[in-house]
Amino acid sequence: MTLILQPGQRLARGVSRHLSTHGFVSIEEFVPTRGLRVDVMGLGPKGELWVVECKSGRADFQSDSKWQGYLDWCDRFFWAVDTEFPTDLLPPETGLIIADAYDAEIVRMSPETKIAGARRKKMVQKFAMDAARRLQTLRDPRV
């Protein structure tokens, strides 16, 4: 059976592959806190946390009213879009990644805004728990 990925999911896969080349691990559709769901959360080799929001088109971007709420939960924030996306719509003070289903490229590095140590510890623990739970579910769906 072949899994059909939606456009945003294809971008997320390419982003995750690219982040791994920088020593990051990532998790898709991560919930840092109630009411927020980020497309990709990356955890770097030094404990840095990056949020990447994948946008498949103009309407998808314009309907996103929560993105600024993600800034409190990461050290860097990026948009990931494909080559056809009108990038002039994206806020210039955010990072930009051009992606497809197979890879990505960081075109504009996001400014770094380090989150507080207590929040970082909480996020890394939640990241680990969510990732382990997903792996366990894959290995034993009845758990």
Image (cartoon, helix red, strand yellow):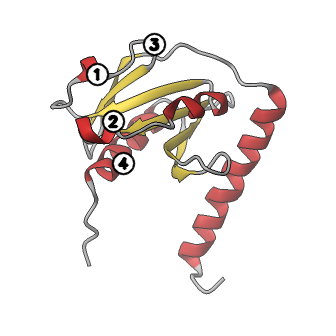
Between 69 and 1, the residue placed more toward the observer is: 69
Is residue 11 depicted above or below 73 in this figure?
A: below
Q: Which amino acid does label 2 sit on?
A: Phe
Quickly name the residue at label 4.
Answer: 13
What element does badge 4 sit on?
Answer: helix
Tell me, yes or no, whether the two marked residues, 3 and 4, touch with CB atoms within 8 Å: no
Between 24 and 83, the residue placed more toward the observer is: 83
Residue 89: assigned label = 1
Q: In front of the other: label 4 or label 1?
A: 1
Q: In front of the other: label 2 or label 4?
A: 2
Is residue 132 depicted above or below 47 in this figure?
A: below
Quickly name the residue at label 2.
Answer: 61
Whichever of labels 4 and 1 marks the residue nearer the N terminus, that label is: 4
For marks 3 and 4, give the CA distance.
24 Å
What element does badge 1 sit on?
Answer: helix
User: Which residue does the image show at 26% across and 40% down from the upper left?
Assistant: 59
Q: What residue type is labelled 3?
A: Glu
For marks 3 and 2, give the CA distance.
16 Å
Tell me, yes or no, whether the two marked residues, 2 and 1, touch with CB atoms within 8 Å: yes
Residue 93: assigned label = 3
Q: Quadrant of residue 57?
A: top left
What element does badge 3 sit on?
Answer: loop
Q: In front of the other: label 3 or label 2?
A: 2
Q: In front of the other: label 3 or label 1?
A: 1
- Residue 109, position in %: x, y? 44, 16
Q: Which amino acid does label 4 sit on?
A: Arg
